[in-house]
Image (cartoon, rainbow, N blue to C red):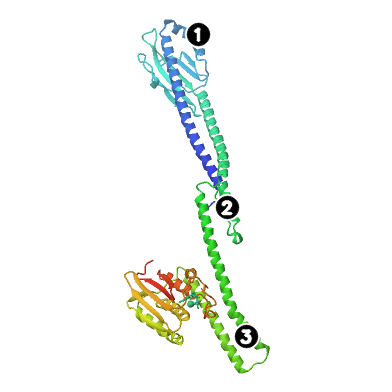
């Protein structure tokens, strides 16, 4: 792709177009003029021959030709003209041929016949100059013998005139094209001013001033939608960037606690010699912190992969009750520890990736166990309907405030960090649930009212999209 500017290309286009248009008009005019001139010259030649014909009817003329041929020689008064008078088969009585043109052998128009333009014979000389000639017989006083008149004309003058005219047309078309190119260049440059302003303004936007917007005033109608889309894109970028910064800030914050603990404990231990028991305890504690770190990095990695839209999942038709039972069994111990009862109900099937379904449900149940009031029931319910399957996890516990409800699915978001168990919670559980539902093209919902919190996952039946 060539890198010529739009201005240059448009100017060139205008110039070529105007040259072609003007040259075409010029050529049409040239052709018209040429046709007119040919007609005029042909008519003039025919008229001349006609005049000579009439003249020859006069009795004295023949004698005059014999006696004073120079009268006829001068009659033409033009270097281009040619005249020959002769009796058939005889030497010419008069021959005027200043241009030394080879006189063509023509069949003369018979004496009784009127001359018309069709009598004009058109040829070209060796150098391309057009030559016209007319031959006609004329009656003389001698009824036995007709005189043959041959008259012609070299079109040198006309050719020169037409050539000059043609050159002028080309020069004019070329000059006009250059002027139009210049004008187009300046106009297009001017018209593209807003585009340059747009480029300059876009150029000045960077990560530090993402909040600045491109000024739409004075933009032409064609560019206004572009500016609007650009500004809308900046809005999206600002939101995305803020989310990303928040995620990194939260991640750093969450990493700081376990790493700080590890450092602190190890430093204290290294300060002096300790007993075996102390080291065992330290290692145990460090192990827990490292587990937290490992879980967090695992979750982060999972989220990063899941958010890649191309991630493939392995959907299968699963028996919901069996799946819930399996997860329930896994959490049974933890629930009993906190005096909680897991109740499973529902049947039917669900179309889902078994690993991911387990993981989503495990995150919801882990939350339910963590946040439920002791000695309450945790309900795991499945319902099948025409469009798909709904899985619900419900627990009795603190109501989540409305303001938090929309945000708890965000990464690292915790409704109340000071809440019980928050030391182990990283705030990633629900964002993983959200990603899993996205991968299944399903939906998720949470309601929290009067001490009852219910999370609902909707798995579509068809693996559409
Ligand atoms: N069943 C629930 N009852 C009350 N609050 C809940 C419940 N489930 C989630 N939450 C709130 O939503 C927040 C986000 O939950 P999420 O599962 O994403 O993170 P977490 O449980 O804090 O940490 P993680 O799951 O990563 O260990 C929780 O911190 C809590 O405030
Ligand atoms: Mg959780």
Residue 265: give its label: 3
Badge 3, how many Cα within 10 Å: few under 14, some, many 20+? some
Measured in 3D between alpha carbons, the distance from the residue under mark 1 to the one under mark 3, in whole angstroms, is 144 Å
Observer-nearest of 92 and 432: 432
**Is residue 380 shown above or below 20?**
below
Badge 3 element: helix
For image coordinates 57% across by 37% down, the residue present is: 179
Q: Which residue is mark 2?
A: 199
Residue 68: give its label: 1
Is residue 459 visible to the viewer in this orientation of the structure? yes
First in sequence: mark 1 or mark 3? 1
Badge 2 element: helix
* Residue 296, image x, y percentages: 53, 78
First in sequence: mark 3 or mark 2? 2
Badge 1, how many Cα within 10 Å: few under 14, some, many 20+? few
Locate residue 314: give its quadrant: bottom left
Nearer mark to the viewer, of 2 and 1? 2
* Residue 428, image x, y percentages: 50, 75
Q: How many marks?
A: 3
**Is residue 214 shown above or below 437?**
above
Locate residue 328: give its quadrant: bottom left
């Amino acid at each position: 792709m060539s890198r010529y500017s739009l201005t240059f290309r448009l100017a060139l286009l205008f110039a070529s177009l105007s040259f072609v248009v003007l040259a075409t008009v010029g050529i049409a005019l040239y052709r018209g003029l040429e046709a007119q001139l040919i007609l005029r010259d042909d008519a003039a030649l025919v008229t001349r021959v006609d005049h000579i014909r009439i003249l020859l009817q006069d009795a004295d003329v023949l004698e005059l030709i014999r006696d004073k041929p120079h009268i006829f020689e001068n009659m033409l008064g033009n270097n281009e003209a040619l005249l020959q008078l002769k009796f058939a088969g005889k030497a010419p009585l008069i021959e005027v041929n200043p241009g030394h043109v080879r006189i063509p052998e023509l069949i003369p128009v018979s004496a009784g016949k009127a001359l018309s333009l069709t009598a004009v014979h058109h040829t070209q000389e060796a150098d391309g100059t057009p030559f016209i000639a007319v031959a006609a017989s004329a009656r003389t006083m001698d009824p036995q013998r007709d005189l043959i008149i041959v008259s012609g004309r070299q079109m040198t003058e006309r050719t020169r005139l037409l050539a000059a005219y043609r050159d002028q047309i080309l020069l004019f078309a070329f000059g006009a094209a250059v002027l139009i190119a210049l004008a187009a260049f300046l106009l297009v440059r001017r018209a593209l001013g807003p585009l340059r302003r747009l480029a300059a303004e876009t150029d000045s936007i960077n990560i530090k001033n993402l909040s600045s917007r491109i000024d739409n005033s004075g933009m032409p109608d064609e560019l206004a939608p572009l500016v609007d889309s650009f500004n809308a894109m900046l809005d999206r970028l600002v939101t995305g960037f803020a989310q990303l910064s928040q995620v990194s800030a939260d991640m750093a914050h969450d990493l700081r606690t376990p790493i700080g603990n590890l450092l602190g404990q190890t430093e204290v231990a290294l300060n002096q010699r300790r007993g075996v028991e102390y080291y065992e305890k330290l290692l145990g504690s460090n192990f827990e912190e490292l587990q937290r770190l490992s879980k967090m990095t695992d979750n982060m990695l999972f989220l990063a992969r899941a958010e890649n839209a191309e991630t493939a999942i392995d959907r299968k038709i699963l028996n919901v009750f069996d799946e819930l039972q399996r997860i329930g069994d896994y959490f049974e111990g933890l629930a009993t520890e906190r005096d909680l009862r897991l109740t499973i109900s529902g049947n039917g099937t669900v179309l889902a990736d078994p690993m991911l379904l387990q993981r989503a449900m495990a995150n919801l149940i882990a939350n339910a166990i963590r946040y439920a009031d002791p000695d309450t029931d945790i309900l795991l319910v499945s319902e099948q309907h025409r469009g798909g399957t709904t899985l619900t996890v419900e627990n009795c516990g603190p109501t989540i405030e409305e303001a938090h409800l929309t945000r708890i699915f965000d990464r690292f978001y915790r409704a109340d960090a000071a809440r019980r168990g928050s030391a182990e919670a990283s705030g990633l559980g629900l964002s993983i649930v959200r990603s899993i539902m996205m991968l299944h093209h399903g939906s998720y919902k949470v309601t929290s009212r009067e001490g009852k919190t219910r999370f609902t996952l909707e798995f579509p039946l068809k693996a559409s999209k």
